[in-house]
Image (cartoon, grey):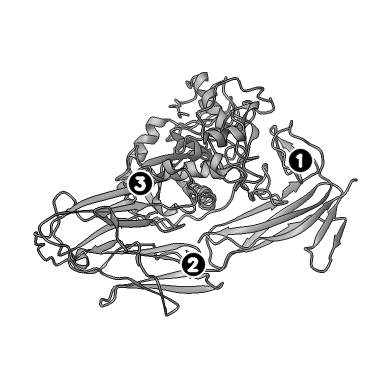
Amino acid sequence: MTSPTAPRRRGVRRGVARLLAGCLLAAGLVGTGTVADGGAAAAESGGATVVPVQTTGPADRRFNLVVMGDGYTAAEMPAFRADLERHLGVLWSIEPFASYRSYINVWAVEVPSKESGVDCDPSLDAPARDTALDMGFWGGCDPGGVQRLLTVNSTKAAGFADLVPGTSRANRQILALAHSSTYGGAGGSYATASGGNALSALITPHELGHSLGGLQDEYDYYARGVPGGGYEGDEPSSAHHTLLTENQMREQRAKWWRWLGEESESGGVIGRHEGGLYSTRGVWRPSRHSMMKTLGYGFDQVEREVMVRAISAKVDLVQGHTPDAAPLGADRTVWVDTLHPTGGELSVLWRLDGRPLPTGGARTLDLRSLDLSPGRTYALTVTVTDPTPFVRDPAVRGSAALTRTVRWTVDPALRTPGDATPVAFTGHTATSAPVGARAVVYADTSHPVRRTPGVTWSLDGRTVPNPGNDRDLDLGALRLAPGPHELTARIPGTREVLRWAVDATPAAAGFELSEPLRTVRRPGRPVEYVYDGPFTMRLTARDDGGGAVVSQFRVDGDGWYTYYGWPTDADAPFRFSPSGTVIDDLVYGKLGRPRAVPWDDATPDYGTHTVEYRTVDAAGNVSPPRRFLVTLVRP
């Protein structure tokens, strides 16, 4: 989808408005987040100030999320920062953004508007606002549009994004937040969302699914409250929609055949679930529900694989290497610097004349150790691959997004001049905030031509064995005990040292329920609460480490669902009821089998249900799930 330029008040064509409306037909959910101290502004123009929110590397080598607000006056800029915190907090709790957070820079472009709010909010007859980005509901105040279609002046948005040095259309994504509590947003080249609505934070990853991954909506309706009817097209080009049966997918090795039969990350089993592309029948999707159908759930495996490729395509796995334009002597070291996903290490394989070398994934190879014979040249290659289990398609794994190869010619007759490159750390995981107990922490070094600087790691004063690739340390493999820890990286023989605080204690999760008919306690079973009608649940979290905490819950082992309060009030508790509550033609809180739209099965699921809850803190720690039982009896 494409975000149109939205002129002041009127002017977005109805066709464009209808095109963009699709990605808004499901409600989003909200979580919490923390924006890091941006420090000094990187650029300022026309009253706009660029603030680095998260810096993982040079802008020209990273995927840059550029976020700007509209309708926030200079006095209201703290509200923009708070809204941004919530959106980022949810984003980092969702895979694959959690595992690839280290690939992403976040920039805030603070653009004060002359007036507070945006156009046509909440109605078409609302007064026009004088704002920096001309954002407006109803598709830019189009009488033929829909209220929740929130557009932005794309020319102005691109101009403000150009203020971020090192970014371009190829390596960035623009997200515009409107200063509004009305639910709304849009997807396409640029994503938009209302900043302050209880449901708005999860619009961001949904729209990034459109913009980055080319994912399509899985709704079975186009206009809310109106079933979409039958699908009449050919086999969809969408990676997560099909007309094929499961047997046909397996026989043809098509669509999501590699994931069939597995428990879906967003709930249920990956198979063939009818409905999608705005049709109720005749087309099928992989999971019962997912981020692209019902905001609040995560991406399922099929969507997640697409998103891994999309994020990785915005960066280069190889960040630097020994120059390859001319032959190298055999009396030196050869090196490659790579990216460092937060969720796992990259694979590095060296080959000489096609024969793998036993380097253990090291980023530097000392050619002197190979004892190469003079009188001939050798072909040296290094292949960097992302071995993430999020990807199963060999074509995706072998694409330039996830696999890169560098080639050199080695001539033992050549002599390499010495150099005076100092031994030092050149890049590392940020030390300004605690790292989580499952994170991969990295420390890169300089590259003298005749020395391979080593990195030694210690945890709480004790050396941690880390053979092979000593630039990365996978804390998850250490199975850290809860509590604070200190991680240290050193280059032996130098004064170079890095220190991180490790937060290995997840945020504590809690819950509050409305008054039950009775409470049942049995040995060896979770506490059981009995109701004969609707009841409410409030999830709470406490984190001694500070920062954002996102709470999640699931019912009867279904997909984890981000807790956001209630659609009409972020401060209200979530409400469960036998058949669910209809709000703006969507259904929330049906106990038991979920129900997303009014025509889904509303039959009450009486009996006992298991409710689990957990937290995801700012360091990425996920708390062990805790549970209680709810029994719904007939009135």
| Total numbered labels placed on residues in the image | 3
Q: How far apart are marks 1 and 3 (CA)?
A: 43 Å
Q: How many neighbours does mark 2 have within 10 angstroms: few (below 14), some (14-19), or many (20 or more)? A: few
Q: Which residue is drawn at 59% across and 64% down?
A: 507
Q: Earlier in the sequence, mark 2 or mark 3?
A: 3
Is residue 610 positioned above or below 208 on the image?
below
- Where does label 1 land, which residue? 580
Q: Which marked residue is nearer to the observer: mark 2 or mark 1?
A: 2
Q: Residue at x 57, y 28 (%)?
A: 126
Q: Position of residue 140 (x, y in %)?
A: 51, 26
Whether residue 127 is visible, yes or no, is no
- Where does label 3 land, which residue? 315
> Of 579 and 256, which appears nearest the observer?
256
Is residue 151 positioned above or below 575 on the image?
above
- Where does label 2 land, which residue? 477
Residue 25 left/right relative to 463: right
Residue type of the residue flagged with mark 3: Val
Q: Which of marks 1 and 3 is nearer the N terminus?
A: 3
Residue type of the residue flagged with mark 2: Ala
Q: Which marked residue is nearer to the observer: mark 2 or mark 3?
A: 2
Q: Where is residue 195 in the image (x, y as percent from the top left)?
A: 53, 42
Q: Position of residue 27 (x, y in %)?
A: 62, 38
Q: Which marked residue is nearer to the observer: mark 1 or mark 3?
A: 3
The quadrant the C terminus occupies is top right
Q: Earlier in the sequence, mark 2 or mark 1?
A: 2
> Mark 2: which secondary structure?
helix
> Mark 3: which secondary structure?
loop
